[in-house]
Image (cartoon, coloured by chain):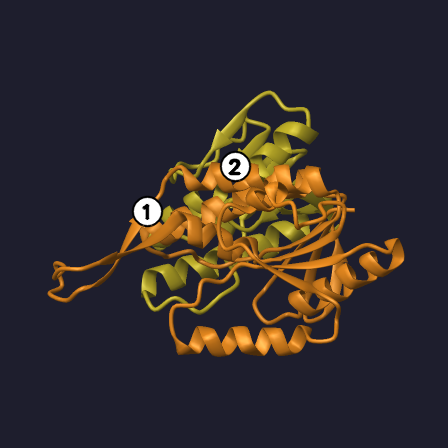
Chain colours: A orange, B yellow
Amino acid sequence: MNVLISGGCKNGKSYYAQKLARDMAQQQGKPLYYIATMIPRDEEDRARIRRHLAERDGWGFETLEQPVHLTALLEDPSVDRSGVFLLDSVTAIMENEMFQRVETEGASLKGNAGTTIVFDETAPSRVAAEMETFAKATGNTVFVSDGIYGDMGEYSRSTEDYRKALAGADRTLAKACDRVIEITYGMEEIWK
Amino acid sequence: MELIFGGAYQGKLDYVKDNYEYSRICDCSDGREPDFDADVIYGIEGFVMECAKAGREAKDFFKDRETLLGDKLLVMTDTSQGVVPIDKNVRAFREMNGRLMLYLAEKAEHVTRVFCGIGKRLK
């Protein structure tokens, strides 16, 4: 069963998704994978990752690091594609693929060496297609995304492009998934 | 009349196209006034934005045309969540949009919310 989970920030989506994936793996006697999608950029990110790892400790997840190009996991011989996968989150993969960070050596326009963000306009449709391929190939993936569409949306062009892209991926996944669940403060609303 | 609403990019218009019979859509997202000869009135928030700029209450516009609502499908974007906008005009729009949605939801025979392209009838 493929499941799409969305909802607001800090509403209990990840916890709900972890329980669901673990139950699915236990019921079917299958390996349980956690697809980690974050690219750590600083100490705050690294601390967040350590906290997430501690939270998943003892749940039986094997962690797969795949912040971009999700379908590469399907080619990995060490990954059992009949297993149960928890992908947390679609949001992070879309960000990683749309806004690629390139390290610059010399001084940038702002006068300091550092990171330039390159916008990949082919990413939105590619990521949505990879998500769909992954769902169909595994048949047992819990996707976690984020509901960021109910406000005024007075954002910069690139943020608005991002919202549109993530919504597109969500809608593609909603079609490909057997269940679509919105989580509000730990409570579920079944959409499909 | 049925009100169909949802957040941005949720596939509201595709949902209407796939699930309802209609002959003409009036797209108000560019700010134009709803044409009640059409059976689907879409992007109503665009018209509300124009109303807010002009200081005209969008709810009253619909109230004055209540008899025209009949079996129309009214499609609009929910902008009610998130932080209160700093800009005074945007804030006025957001509140006006909310007042209109509240009014339409009360008048509507059915209300449907669209999420990730999926519709759910709330009323």
Q: Residue at x 77, y 66 (%)?
A: A19
Residue B98 lies, in percent from the top left, at 53, 58
Chain on which label 1 sits: A
Query: Which mark, by number, is residue A119?
Result: 1
Nearest the viewer among A168 and B121 is A168
Residue at the farthest front position? A77
**Residues at circles 2 and 1 in contact by the CB criterion of under 8 Å:** no
Q: Which image quadrant is residue B92 in?
A: bottom left
Q: Which residue is mark 2?
A: B42
Q: Is residue B107 visible?
A: yes
Q: Is label 2 in a helix, a strand or a loop?
A: strand
Please check whether the numbered discs 2 and 1 fall on a single chain.
Answer: no
SS under mark 1: strand
Q: Is residue B8 left or right of residue A31?
A: left
Asked if residue A22 is positioned above or below residue B30 in the image, the reply reads below
Whether residue B64 is visible: no
Is residue A192 rendered to the left or right of residue A56? right
Which amino acid type is marked by label 1?
A: Phe
At a point 59% along the width and 56% down the height, the residue shown is A145
Chain under label 2? B
Disc 2 residue type (three-letter): Tyr
- How far is the residue under mark 2 from the one under mark 1? 31 Å
Q: Quadrant of residue A186?
A: bottom right
